Image (tube, helix red, strand yellow):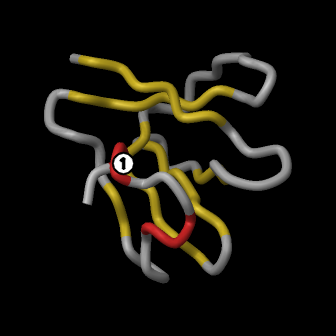
Amino acid sequence: MFIGDVRQIEDLAEGETATPEPDMGYELRTANGDRFELGTVEHLVRRGDMIIARTTAGEEFAVVGRNAHVLVPLSF
């Protein structure tokens, strides 16, 4: 499954991952639009009622819920 296919939490099964589409990447921004350098998104994973983005820098951020980060597509 690709990241662009994930529209709601139920699109992923518990523990299932979604990766970037070929020739695409994603960065994360805070809800107010601030950009930060923590690598690009390696994959999304569902954990319970949360979807977590794991970056190439090994950091993890929620992309749903309160204080969620925003996925920003990048084309390569």
Residue 23, by quadrant, is top left
Type of the residue with mark 1: Ile
Front position in the image: 28 or 14: 14
- The residue where tag 1 is placed is 3
* Vertical arrangement, residue 35 with respect to residue 21, above or below: above
Give the crowd class for mark 1: few <14, some 14-19, many >=20 residues within 10 Å.
many
Q: Residue furthest left?
A: 22
Query: For this view, does 47 lie left or right of residue 75?
Result: right
Question: Where's residue 34, x and y in %?
Answer: 73, 17
Q: Secondary structure beneath disc 1?
A: helix
Q: Quadrant of the N terminus?
A: bottom left
- Relative to 8, does residue 58 appear above or below in the rendering? above
- In this rendering, the answer to whether 60 lies above or below 23 is below
Q: Nearer the viewer, residue 24 or 39?
A: 24
- On the rendered image, what quadrant is the C terminus found in? top left
Residue located at (50% from left, 26% from top): 72
Q: Position of residue 8 (x, y in %)?
A: 54, 59
Taking the spot 77% from the left edge, 30% from the top edge, the residue there is: 31
In x, y percent, where is residue 74? Answer: 36, 20
Q: Is residue 2 left or right of residue 46?
A: left
Where residue 70 sits in the image (x, y, percent)? 63, 34
At x 27% / y 18%, what residue is drawn?
75
